[in-house]
Amino acid sequence: MESTRTKIIHLLSSNEKTYVSGQELSDRLHISRSAIWKHMKELEKDGYLIEAIRNKGYRIVKSPNKLSENTVQWGLHTDWLGKNVVHKESTPSTQQIAHQLARDHASHGTVVIADEQTAGKGRLNREWHSAKNKGIWTSLILRPAILPYLAPQITLLTATVLADVFKKELNLDPKIKWPNDIMINDRKVAGILTEMQAEQDQIQYIIIGIGINVNQEMNELPEDIQQKATSLRATSEKEYDITSLIQRIFVHFEKVYAEYETYGFPIIKERWESYGYRLGERTTIKTMKETSEAVLVGIAEDGALLAQYDNDSIKKVYSGEIDWFPNR
Ligand code: BT5
Protein backbone atom coordinates (compact mmCIF):
# COMPACT_ATOMS: atom_id res chain seq x y z
CA MET A 1 0.00 0.00 0.00
CA GLU A 2 1.29 3.41 -0.91
CA SER A 3 1.45 5.81 2.01
CA THR A 4 -0.51 9.06 1.85
CA ARG A 5 2.65 11.07 1.45
CA THR A 6 3.85 8.90 -1.45
CA LYS A 7 0.45 9.46 -3.07
CA ILE A 8 0.79 13.20 -2.54
CA ILE A 9 4.24 13.14 -4.16
CA HIS A 10 2.86 11.17 -7.10
CA LEU A 11 -0.03 13.56 -7.57
CA LEU A 12 2.25 16.57 -7.40
CA SER A 13 4.97 15.12 -9.60
CA SER A 14 2.58 14.28 -12.41
CA ASN A 15 1.97 18.03 -12.56
CA GLU A 16 5.46 19.39 -12.11
CA LYS A 17 4.81 22.68 -13.87
CA THR A 18 1.35 23.32 -12.52
CA TYR A 19 -0.14 23.56 -9.08
CA VAL A 20 -2.51 21.02 -7.59
CA SER A 21 -5.11 22.56 -5.35
CA GLY A 22 -5.58 21.54 -1.74
CA GLN A 23 -9.19 20.71 -2.62
CA GLU A 24 -8.19 18.34 -5.40
CA LEU A 25 -5.65 16.58 -3.17
CA SER A 26 -8.21 16.34 -0.43
CA ASP A 27 -10.86 14.89 -2.80
CA ARG A 28 -8.50 12.37 -4.31
CA LEU A 29 -6.99 11.18 -1.05
CA HIS A 30 -10.16 11.38 1.04
CA ILE A 31 -8.52 13.40 3.79
CA SER A 32 -9.15 16.93 5.04
CA ARG A 33 -7.37 20.00 3.70
CA SER A 34 -5.73 20.58 7.04
CA ALA A 35 -4.41 17.00 6.94
CA ILE A 36 -2.94 17.77 3.50
CA TRP A 37 -1.30 20.87 4.93
CA LYS A 38 0.25 18.80 7.74
CA HIS A 39 1.64 16.32 5.21
CA MET A 40 3.21 19.19 3.29
CA LYS A 41 4.95 20.36 6.45
CA GLU A 42 6.27 16.82 6.98
CA LEU A 43 7.59 16.70 3.42
CA GLU A 44 9.36 20.00 3.98
CA LYS A 45 11.01 18.60 7.09
CA ASP A 46 12.31 15.81 4.85
CA GLY A 47 13.95 18.30 2.53
CA TYR A 48 11.29 18.82 -0.12
CA LEU A 49 10.88 22.40 -1.24
CA ILE A 50 7.17 23.00 -1.67
CA GLU A 51 5.56 26.10 -3.02
CA ALA A 52 2.06 26.85 -1.75
CA ILE A 53 0.13 29.62 -3.45
CA ARG A 54 -3.27 30.79 -2.34
CA ASN A 55 -6.01 30.00 -4.86
CA LYS A 56 -3.61 27.88 -6.91
CA GLY A 57 -2.37 25.08 -4.71
CA TYR A 58 0.85 23.19 -4.14
CA ARG A 59 3.85 22.41 -6.28
CA ILE A 60 7.11 20.53 -5.54
CA VAL A 61 9.96 22.81 -6.54
CA LYS A 62 12.83 20.55 -5.53
CA SER A 63 13.23 17.15 -3.98
CA PRO A 64 15.84 16.43 -1.29
CA ASN A 65 19.35 15.62 -2.32
CA LYS A 66 19.30 12.06 -1.07
CA LEU A 67 18.12 8.79 -2.49
CA SER A 68 14.73 7.48 -1.47
CA GLU A 69 11.74 5.84 -3.10
CA ASN A 70 10.17 9.28 -3.42
CA THR A 71 13.13 11.18 -4.80
CA VAL A 72 13.72 8.53 -7.45
CA GLN A 73 10.09 8.67 -8.49
CA TRP A 74 9.67 12.43 -8.37
CA GLY A 75 9.97 13.61 -11.96
CA LEU A 76 10.74 10.11 -13.32
CA HIS A 77 9.14 10.03 -16.76
CA THR A 78 8.86 6.32 -17.41
CA ASP A 79 5.87 4.08 -18.08
CA TRP A 80 6.93 0.94 -16.24
CA LEU A 81 10.55 1.05 -15.09
CA GLY A 82 10.90 2.31 -11.55
CA LYS A 83 7.17 2.65 -10.95
CA ASN A 84 7.83 0.39 -8.02
CA VAL A 85 11.02 1.30 -6.11
CA VAL A 86 12.52 -0.31 -3.05
CA HIS A 87 15.29 1.77 -1.49
CA LYS A 88 17.67 0.65 1.26
CA GLU A 89 20.29 2.74 2.95
CA SER A 90 22.46 -0.30 3.47
CA THR A 91 22.02 -3.88 2.35
CA PRO A 92 24.30 -6.83 1.61
CA SER A 93 23.25 -6.88 -2.05
CA THR A 94 20.36 -5.40 -4.02
CA GLN A 95 20.36 -8.66 -6.03
CA GLN A 96 19.23 -10.63 -2.96
CA ILE A 97 16.32 -8.30 -2.30
CA ALA A 98 15.34 -8.31 -5.96
CA HIS A 99 15.28 -12.14 -6.05
CA GLN A 100 13.01 -12.19 -3.04
CA LEU A 101 10.68 -9.58 -4.53
CA ALA A 102 10.60 -11.37 -7.88
CA ARG A 103 9.71 -14.66 -6.19
CA ASP A 104 6.92 -12.75 -4.44
CA HIS A 105 5.58 -11.69 -7.88
CA ALA A 106 7.00 -8.16 -8.09
CA SER A 107 6.05 -6.60 -11.39
CA HIS A 108 8.22 -6.12 -14.47
CA GLY A 109 10.20 -2.93 -13.92
CA THR A 110 10.43 -3.09 -10.13
CA VAL A 111 13.80 -1.74 -8.99
CA VAL A 112 15.89 -2.04 -5.86
CA ILE A 113 18.38 0.71 -5.07
CA ALA A 114 20.85 1.02 -2.22
CA ASP A 115 23.09 3.79 -0.91
CA GLU A 116 25.60 1.13 0.08
CA GLN A 117 26.11 -2.61 -0.33
CA THR A 118 28.07 -4.50 2.28
CA ALA A 119 28.44 -7.67 0.18
CA GLY A 120 28.01 -6.48 -3.41
CA LYS A 121 28.41 -9.28 -5.92
CA GLY A 122 30.19 -9.50 -9.23
CA ARG A 123 30.02 -12.49 -11.53
CA LEU A 124 31.29 -15.89 -10.36
CA ASN A 125 30.94 -14.77 -6.76
CA ARG A 126 33.49 -12.02 -7.19
CA GLU A 127 33.25 -9.01 -4.94
CA TRP A 128 31.75 -5.68 -6.04
CA HIS A 129 32.81 -2.64 -4.01
CA SER A 130 29.81 -0.40 -3.38
CA ALA A 131 30.78 2.55 -1.18
CA LYS A 132 28.08 4.56 0.56
CA ASN A 133 26.53 7.36 -1.51
CA LYS A 134 29.33 7.15 -4.06
CA GLY A 135 27.71 5.19 -6.81
CA ILE A 136 24.63 3.62 -8.32
CA TRP A 137 23.95 0.17 -6.92
CA THR A 138 20.70 -1.07 -8.36
CA SER A 139 18.88 -4.22 -9.49
CA LEU A 140 16.08 -4.23 -12.08
CA ILE A 141 13.48 -6.98 -12.16
CA LEU A 142 12.44 -7.78 -15.73
CA ARG A 143 10.08 -10.36 -17.14
CA PRO A 144 11.00 -10.49 -20.83
CA ALA A 145 9.10 -12.75 -23.20
CA ILE A 146 12.21 -14.28 -24.74
CA LEU A 147 13.76 -17.75 -24.65
CA PRO A 148 16.20 -18.29 -21.78
CA TYR A 149 19.22 -18.79 -24.06
CA LEU A 150 18.71 -15.24 -25.36
CA ALA A 151 18.93 -13.68 -21.88
CA PRO A 152 22.51 -12.46 -22.48
CA GLN A 153 20.98 -10.07 -25.01
CA ILE A 154 19.47 -8.15 -22.10
CA THR A 155 22.93 -7.76 -20.54
CA LEU A 156 24.27 -6.45 -23.83
CA LEU A 157 21.28 -4.13 -24.13
CA THR A 158 21.93 -2.79 -20.64
CA ALA A 159 25.56 -2.13 -21.49
CA THR A 160 24.52 -0.07 -24.53
CA VAL A 161 22.11 1.92 -22.37
CA LEU A 162 24.85 2.84 -19.91
CA ALA A 163 27.30 3.65 -22.70
CA ASP A 164 24.70 5.84 -24.44
CA VAL A 165 23.94 7.80 -21.28
CA PHE A 166 27.64 8.29 -20.48
CA LYS A 167 28.38 9.37 -24.01
CA LYS A 168 25.35 11.35 -25.09
CA GLU A 169 24.33 12.92 -21.81
CA LEU A 170 27.63 13.21 -19.95
CA ASN A 171 29.95 13.69 -22.94
CA LEU A 172 32.30 10.92 -21.87
CA ASP A 173 33.91 8.32 -24.11
CA PRO A 174 32.80 4.87 -22.90
CA LYS A 175 33.63 1.48 -24.42
CA ILE A 176 32.00 -1.84 -23.66
CA LYS A 177 34.39 -4.64 -22.84
CA TRP A 178 32.72 -7.92 -23.62
CA PRO A 179 30.42 -8.94 -22.14
CA ASN A 180 29.53 -6.54 -19.39
CA ASP A 181 32.14 -3.99 -18.38
CA ILE A 182 31.85 -0.32 -19.20
CA MET A 183 35.30 1.15 -19.61
CA ILE A 184 36.53 4.71 -19.73
CA ASN A 185 40.22 5.28 -20.50
CA ASP A 186 40.84 1.51 -20.26
CA ARG A 187 39.47 1.39 -16.72
CA LYS A 188 36.24 -0.15 -15.50
CA VAL A 189 33.63 2.38 -14.44
CA ALA A 190 30.58 0.10 -14.35
CA GLY A 191 29.66 -3.58 -14.32
CA ILE A 192 26.51 -5.56 -14.96
CA LEU A 193 25.47 -8.80 -13.31
CA THR A 194 22.58 -10.72 -14.88
CA GLU A 195 20.86 -13.47 -12.92
CA MET A 196 17.76 -15.33 -13.96
CA GLN A 197 15.16 -17.81 -12.92
CA ALA A 198 13.91 -19.83 -15.87
CA GLU A 199 12.38 -23.05 -17.05
CA GLN A 200 13.53 -24.68 -20.24
CA ASP A 201 11.50 -22.51 -22.57
CA GLN A 202 10.39 -19.65 -20.39
CA ILE A 203 12.01 -16.94 -18.31
CA GLN A 204 10.29 -16.29 -15.01
CA TYR A 205 12.38 -13.27 -14.28
CA ILE A 206 15.73 -11.69 -14.95
CA ILE A 207 17.55 -9.50 -12.49
CA ILE A 208 19.91 -6.99 -14.00
CA GLY A 209 22.35 -5.72 -11.39
CA ILE A 210 24.01 -2.47 -12.33
CA GLY A 211 26.97 -1.05 -10.44
CA ILE A 212 28.37 2.34 -11.46
CA ASN A 213 31.20 4.20 -9.76
CA VAL A 214 29.96 7.78 -9.79
CA ASN A 215 31.46 10.20 -7.28
CA GLN A 216 34.55 8.47 -5.90
CA GLU A 217 37.84 10.31 -6.16
CA MET A 218 40.56 8.06 -7.55
CA ASN A 219 42.17 7.61 -4.11
CA GLU A 220 38.81 6.58 -2.63
CA LEU A 221 38.65 3.46 -4.78
CA PRO A 222 39.73 0.34 -2.91
CA GLU A 223 43.38 -0.52 -3.31
CA ASP A 224 42.86 -3.83 -5.07
CA ILE A 225 41.11 -2.12 -8.00
CA GLN A 226 42.88 1.25 -8.11
CA GLN A 227 44.94 0.26 -11.13
CA LYS A 228 41.99 -0.97 -13.16
CA ALA A 229 38.93 0.99 -12.05
CA THR A 230 37.70 4.54 -12.32
CA SER A 231 34.59 6.60 -11.57
CA LEU A 232 32.62 9.11 -13.61
CA ARG A 233 33.98 11.82 -11.38
CA ALA A 234 37.58 10.67 -11.64
CA THR A 235 37.39 10.71 -15.44
CA SER A 236 35.61 14.04 -15.78
CA GLU A 237 36.37 15.96 -12.59
CA LYS A 238 32.68 16.63 -12.15
CA GLU A 239 30.37 15.54 -9.39
CA TYR A 240 27.09 13.99 -10.43
CA ASP A 241 23.63 13.98 -8.92
CA ILE A 242 23.02 10.29 -8.34
CA THR A 243 19.22 10.51 -8.34
CA SER A 244 19.04 12.33 -11.62
CA LEU A 245 21.57 9.96 -13.20
CA ILE A 246 19.45 6.99 -12.12
CA GLN A 247 16.42 8.63 -13.70
CA ARG A 248 18.22 9.29 -16.98
CA ILE A 249 19.34 5.67 -17.09
CA PHE A 250 15.82 4.37 -16.42
CA VAL A 251 14.27 6.62 -19.06
CA HIS A 252 16.83 5.58 -21.65
CA PHE A 253 16.57 1.92 -20.64
CA GLU A 254 12.85 1.95 -21.26
CA LYS A 255 13.31 3.52 -24.68
CA VAL A 256 15.95 1.02 -25.78
CA TYR A 257 13.97 -1.90 -24.35
CA ALA A 258 10.97 -0.83 -26.45
CA GLU A 259 13.17 -0.67 -29.55
CA TYR A 260 14.48 -4.15 -28.77
CA GLU A 261 10.93 -5.46 -28.42
CA THR A 262 9.96 -3.92 -31.75
CA TYR A 263 13.05 -4.50 -33.88
CA GLY A 264 14.83 -7.33 -32.11
CA PHE A 265 18.50 -7.89 -31.37
CA PRO A 266 20.09 -6.48 -34.58
CA ILE A 267 19.83 -2.86 -33.43
CA ILE A 268 21.37 -3.72 -30.06
CA LYS A 269 24.15 -5.68 -31.76
CA GLU A 270 24.95 -2.77 -34.04
CA ARG A 271 25.06 -0.28 -31.17
CA TRP A 272 27.00 -2.60 -28.92
CA GLU A 273 29.59 -3.12 -31.65
CA SER A 274 29.92 0.64 -32.11
CA TYR A 275 31.11 0.78 -28.48
CA GLY A 276 32.99 -2.54 -28.48
CA TYR A 277 36.28 -2.40 -26.57
CA ARG A 278 39.22 -3.48 -28.76
CA LEU A 279 36.89 -4.55 -31.54
CA GLY A 280 38.75 -4.77 -34.82
CA GLU A 281 42.03 -5.34 -32.97
CA ARG A 282 44.20 -8.42 -32.80
CA THR A 283 44.20 -10.13 -29.44
CA THR A 284 45.69 -13.23 -27.96
CA ILE A 285 43.21 -15.98 -27.34
CA LYS A 286 44.07 -18.94 -25.17
CA THR A 287 41.90 -22.01 -25.30
CA MET A 288 42.57 -25.28 -23.50
CA LYS A 289 44.36 -26.54 -26.61
CA GLU A 290 46.28 -23.59 -28.02
CA THR A 291 47.22 -19.93 -27.91
CA SER A 292 46.61 -17.97 -31.08
CA GLU A 293 45.96 -14.51 -32.38
CA ALA A 294 42.64 -13.37 -33.78
CA VAL A 295 40.76 -10.18 -34.52
CA LEU A 296 37.67 -9.53 -32.43
CA VAL A 297 34.91 -8.77 -34.90
CA GLY A 298 31.58 -8.56 -33.09
CA ILE A 299 28.95 -10.37 -31.06
CA ALA A 300 26.60 -13.24 -31.88
CA GLU A 301 22.86 -13.55 -31.28
CA ASP A 302 23.45 -15.63 -28.15
CA GLY A 303 25.75 -12.95 -26.77
CA ALA A 304 29.05 -14.71 -27.52
CA LEU A 305 32.04 -12.74 -28.77
CA LEU A 306 33.21 -13.48 -32.32
CA ALA A 307 36.87 -13.74 -33.27
CA GLN A 308 38.23 -14.05 -36.77
CA TYR A 309 41.33 -16.22 -37.09
CA ASP A 310 44.03 -15.88 -39.73
CA ASN A 311 42.48 -18.64 -41.82
CA ASP A 312 39.33 -16.45 -41.91
CA SER A 313 37.29 -18.82 -39.78
CA ILE A 314 35.09 -17.04 -37.24
CA LYS A 315 34.70 -18.65 -33.85
CA LYS A 316 32.89 -17.84 -30.64
CA VAL A 317 35.21 -17.11 -27.77
CA TYR A 318 34.65 -16.68 -24.08
CA SER A 319 35.82 -14.17 -21.54
CA GLY A 320 38.56 -16.04 -19.72
CA GLU A 321 40.23 -16.85 -23.02
CA ILE A 322 41.04 -13.31 -24.04
CA ASP A 323 44.11 -11.40 -23.00
CA TRP A 324 42.55 -7.94 -22.75
CA PHE A 325 45.51 -6.14 -21.25
CA PRO A 326 48.73 -7.63 -22.64
CA ASN A 327 50.77 -4.78 -21.16
CA ARG A 328 49.23 -4.65 -17.73
C1 BT5 B 1 30.62 -7.20 -12.49
O1 BT5 B 1 31.18 -8.40 -12.14
O2 BT5 B 1 31.18 -6.32 -13.06
C2 BT5 B 1 29.18 -7.07 -12.04
C3 BT5 B 1 28.99 -5.99 -11.03
C4 BT5 B 1 27.55 -5.83 -10.65
C5 BT5 B 1 27.35 -4.97 -9.43
C6 BT5 B 1 25.92 -4.68 -9.16
S1 BT5 B 1 25.69 -3.44 -7.98
C7 BT5 B 1 24.00 -3.78 -7.85
C8 BT5 B 1 23.87 -5.28 -7.92
N1 BT5 B 1 23.98 -5.87 -6.62
C9 BT5 B 1 25.07 -6.64 -6.50
O3 BT5 B 1 25.39 -7.25 -5.48
N2 BT5 B 1 25.73 -6.65 -7.68
C10 BT5 B 1 25.08 -5.85 -8.67
P1 BT5 B 1 32.60 -8.90 -12.65
O4 BT5 B 1 32.71 -8.75 -14.11
O5 BT5 B 1 32.75 -10.25 -12.06
O6 BT5 B 1 33.64 -7.91 -11.99
C11 BT5 B 1 34.04 -8.04 -10.66
C12 BT5 B 1 35.47 -7.53 -10.56
O7 BT5 B 1 35.51 -6.13 -10.79
C13 BT5 B 1 36.08 -7.74 -9.19
O8 BT5 B 1 36.72 -8.98 -9.11
C14 BT5 B 1 37.07 -6.57 -9.09
O9 BT5 B 1 38.29 -6.89 -9.74
C15 BT5 B 1 36.42 -5.49 -9.90
N3 BT5 B 1 35.64 -4.56 -9.06
C16 BT5 B 1 35.04 -4.76 -7.87
N4 BT5 B 1 34.38 -3.67 -7.47
C17 BT5 B 1 34.58 -2.74 -8.42
C18 BT5 B 1 34.15 -1.41 -8.58
N5 BT5 B 1 33.38 -0.77 -7.70
N6 BT5 B 1 34.55 -0.76 -9.70
C19 BT5 B 1 35.32 -1.35 -10.64
N7 BT5 B 1 35.75 -2.61 -10.54
C20 BT5 B 1 35.38 -3.32 -9.44
Image (cartoon, rainbow, N blue to C red):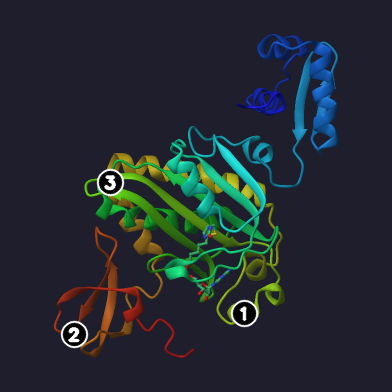
Q: Residue 207: x and y, percent?
A: 44, 50
> In the image, is 272 to the left or to the right of 187?
left
Amino acid beneath label 1: Gln
Number of the label disc, if any, that sits on residue 328 = none
Q: Residue 234: x and y, percent?
A: 66, 70
| First in residue order: circle 3 vs circle 1 | 1
Q: Residue 39: x and y, percent?
A: 80, 24
Q: Residue 41: x and y, percent?
A: 85, 27
Number of the label disc, if any, that sits on residue 226 = 1
Q: Distance between the residues labelled 1 and 2?
A: 36 Å
Q: Name the residue under label 2.
A: 310
Quarter of image, res 179: bottom left
* Front-most of residues 160 and 116: 116
Determine whether the residue tagged by mark 2 lies in a helix, strand or loop.
loop
Q: Distance between the residues labelled 3 and 1?
A: 38 Å
| First in residue order: circle 3 vs circle 2 | 3
| First in residue order: circle 1 vs circle 2 | 1
* Front tag of 3 and 1: 1
Q: Residues within 10 Å of mark 1 (few under 14, many from 20)?
A: few
Q: Distance between the residues labelled 3 and 2?
A: 31 Å
Amino acid beneath label 3: Gly
- Residue, x 44% and y 36% (percent of image)? 105
Q: Name the residue under label 3.
A: 264
* Front-most of residues 211 and 78: 211
* Front tag of 3 and 2: 3
**Rendered position, 32 above or below 195:** above
